[in-house]
Amino acid sequence: MGEIEGTYRVVQTPGTRLGTQRTTGISTLEPGQTLSTALPSSPTKAKNLDLCSSVLLLDGTVLPVEVGPKTTGQDLLSQVFTHLNVVETDYFGIEFQTAQSQWVWLEPLKFVNKQLRKPKNAKMRLAVKFFPPDPGQLQEEYTRYLFAMQIKRDLAEERLVCSDNTSALLVSLLLQSEVGDYDQNVDQENLRSTEYLQRQHSLEERILECHRQHLGMSPADADFQILEISRRLELYGTRFYLASDREGAKINLSVSHMGVLVFQGNTKINTFNWSKIRKLSFKRRRFLIKLHPEVHGPYQDALEFLLPSRDMCKRFWKICVEYHSFFRLQDQPKPKSKPVLLSRGSSFRYSGRTQKQLIEYVRDTSVKRPPYERSFLSLRV
């Protein structure tokens, strides 16, 4: 049968509700040390070997970036965050597109040229990686704006599937955020130049009618309403991984702040809450969930799903590890010590701050920033 390739034991705290951070963990960093200072910086002498690449940002603009032989994923993220002046950085990541047109998360601790075959020609984009259950947990207006732009992208790519009425309402709020109060000529021009939805033309009148009702709403309030509506949708923040169960039925797997989700098509049919899960592991193409005894009782204690490839299985296992660590732990988990001779299984662990650490950091150190200035406001003035 072969060895288990990756295992992650889910740490639990009795009585903890979903979405809270009352769990224990061990920080991997020394006091006063941050992830950016802990990572090795690229040698100066390698500067002449740097390649120019680019990252698509959430507002649709493209940022040129430098990728050297020793550039890590975190180095690349730092270039993007410095340009954008983002404070709540840990909610975001960079995706790159594989030859199979799949979007894969760039790992912060690995060298970029070990993850991308041709960094210069790679398609990379900034994206929201961790979707909190409540937009009120996002403390910066600019962060909420970036989340709203992620919703815009998910609607256009049909990842966030919803009813026509909800779609029209979301697009109308995006218009309020991006162009301000209703103006028929401005709205129609914007709808001609921007594809918010693939069925946009048939919903245009409904979108305009919804936009008329937002008169006087600030762009920041529009962003918040976009997130409030989106978070109640079943597909909010979901990224599907095609799989099959033991009976061979086709399903989609995903992960959220709650736990591991199972979908049939776009309909959620099961949720394995973090409180029910004892261990997550993968073996080649098989993704395994071990449940606590009080959950399964005398019956099946392990659930098994088959993914199309080992790589896809490992990617899903990794994002599950990261989601649990980010939302359920207090501190970064301690990395496995490297064995002297033989190594079995993956040593992968989440490397960033947990949500609890991030909220405390912003609360304790962030300087009050002015509201994010929208370009259309300066144009109208």
Image (cartoon, grey):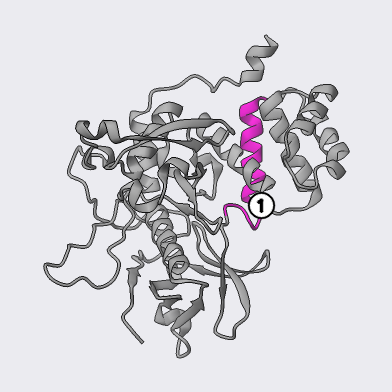
* Residue 352 visible in the snapshot: no
Give the tally of numbered discs.
1
Closest to the observer, 60 or 184: 60
The quarter of the picture where the N terminus appears is: bottom left
From this viewpoint, which residue is outermost toward the top? 381
| SS state under label 1 | loop
- Overall secondary structure of the magenta section: helix
Residue at image position (33%, 77%) is: 4
Q: In this view, does 358 lie to the left or right of 268?
A: left
Q: Is residue 375 left or right of residue 43?
A: right
Closest to the observer, 88 or 213: 88
In the image, residue 223 lies in the stretch drawn in magenta: yes
In the image, residue 231 lies in the stretch drawn in magenta: yes
From this viewpoint, which residue is outermost toward the bottom? 298
- The magenta stretch spans which residues? 218-237
* Residue 223 visible in the snapshot: yes
In which quarter of the view is residue 268 placed?
A: bottom right
Across and down, in percent, residue 196 comes to: 72, 40
Residue at image position (28%, 71%) is: 345
Closest to the observer, 266 or 225: 266
The quarter of the picture where the C terminus appears is: top right
Image height of 265 relative to 32, above or below:
below
Q: Is residue 159 left or right of residue 257?
A: right
Dot 1 amino acid type: Leu
Image height of 201 relative to 217, above or below:
below
> For mark 1, does the 10 Å Cα neighbourhood hold few (<14), some (14 to 19), or many (20 or more) residues?
many
Residue behind mark 1: 160
Across and down, in percent, residue 239 comes to: 56, 57
Across and down, in percent, residue 11 comes to: 33, 65
Residue at image position (59%, 34%) is: 60
Q: Is residue 84 left or right of residue 186?
A: left
